[in-house]
Amino acid sequence: MSRDCLATPVPFSAGTAAPHTALPAGACDCHVHVYDQRFPAAPGARLLPPDASAQDYRALQQHIGTTRVVLVTPSTYGHDNRCLLEGLAALAAMGVDARGVAVIDGSESDAELHHLHAAGVRGVRLNLSLGVSGSVDSIVPLAHRIAPWGWHLQLLVPPEQLAEQGVVLGQLPVPLVFDHFGRIAPAQAGRHAAHAVLLGLLQSGRAWVKLSGGYIVSSVHSVEDPLLDALAASYLRCAPGRVVWGSDWPHATASAGVQPLPDDARQVDRLADWTAACGGPALLHQVLVDNPQALYGFGRPL
C-alpha cells in the first residue's frame, strides 16, 4: 500500500492521506454497498444515493489496504439483489475476494437461494431501522428459511426492539450479525437494555457485531467521537472473536445530508485505536482477517 497522499480523494470518501495503520494481509471491509441507477429504487426508499460502482470501491481498497470485502444489498433496492450480484461479479473479475449479504422476503425458491449462494452470498439482512420491507415478525421465518444454507441473519434494529426481542434472538437457528455497533448510541453503552442483550448474545457465541457506521450512531456524526471508544471496547473485550469492521462506503447517509462524508483512512486508524487499547496488533488482525474468514468463509471455494 502506498503511504503517499492521493492527488484527489477516492470517490465517496473524504481526505487524501493514507491510513497511518498498515493493514494485515487479507484484511476485510465487511460492510459496503454498491449503487446503480439502472436498477429502480424500491417504493418508499429513503436513501437514493448516486451511482457507486465496484470499480469505485476498488480504488478505496487500494488506498486503505483491504483486500477482501462484503457487499450488502442496501435498503434502496428492497428485495432486489441484482445490483449486489453485478457488484460481486465485477469484483471477482478484478480478482477481489468478495462475499455478499442479500435481502429476501422468505418466499424465494430453493433455486433462487442457490443462485445467491453460488454468487457468494452468506447472509441475509433485515433492516428495521431504515428498511422499506420486513418487520420484527419476519425475524423467525427468515431465520428458518436460511438455516439450511448455513447463512447468518444480519440485523439493523432500533435499540428498543433489540431489547424486546432478546429472548427470541437467543433461540434462532442461525448466527446473528448486528451492523453499525448494534445501532446503539455511545451514550447508551452500559445504560440501555439493548446493549446488555447484545453483549449477552456475543458472549454466548450466538452473534457477531460490526464496528461500522460509527459516524451514524455518534451524536456528533463523526467517527472521531471519543465516546465511541468505550462502546467499541465493550464489544472487543466481551467477545474479541465475534467482532468485524466495515467502512459503510459509499456512505449513503452522507449523500443524503445526514452527516459529513467520512474519511475512510481515518476510520481505519480509529479501528486501530480501539484494538490497540484492547489487545494490540494481534487483535487488529483478528478483527480484520480471522473473524471475517470464520464468518464469511473467505479462503474457501464458493
Image (tube, rainbow, N blue to C red):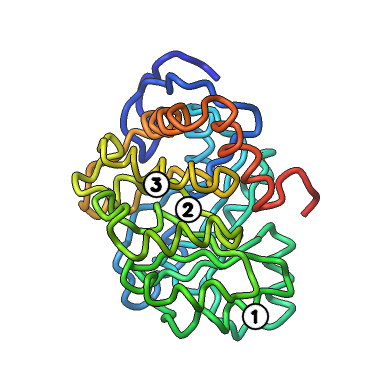
Tell me residue 47's x, y (percent): 31, 62
The residue mark sitting in front, 3 or 1, is: 1
Tell me residue 89's x, y (percent): 65, 52
> Residue 250 got which mark?
3
User: Which residue sits at x=34%, y=53%?
Assistant: 252
The residue mark sitting in front, 1 or 2, is: 1
* Three-letter code for the amino acid on which mark 1 is drawn: Arg
Q: What kind of element bears circle 2?
A: loop
Tell me residue 39's x, y (percent): 46, 66
User: Which residue sits at x=62%, y=53%?
Assistant: 88
Side of 286 relative to 164 (left or right): right
Find the residue positioned furthest to the top.
4
Q: Quadrant of residue 46?
A: bottom left
Give the mark nearer the N terminus: 1 vs 2.
2
Dot 2: within a 10 Å radius of its alpha carbon, few (fewer than 14), some, or many (20 or more) residues? many
> Residue 34 got which mark?
2
Tell me residue 68's x, y (percent): 62, 40
Q: What kind of element bears circle 3?
A: loop
Disc 1 to disc 2, how far (Cα)? 26 Å
Q: Look at the picture and state if 195 lies above or below 94.
A: below
Residue tagged by mark 1? 145
* Three-letter code for the amino acid on which mark 2 is drawn: Val
User: Which residue sits at x=28%, y=54%?
Assistant: 185
* Three-letter code for the amino acid on which mark 3 is drawn: Pro
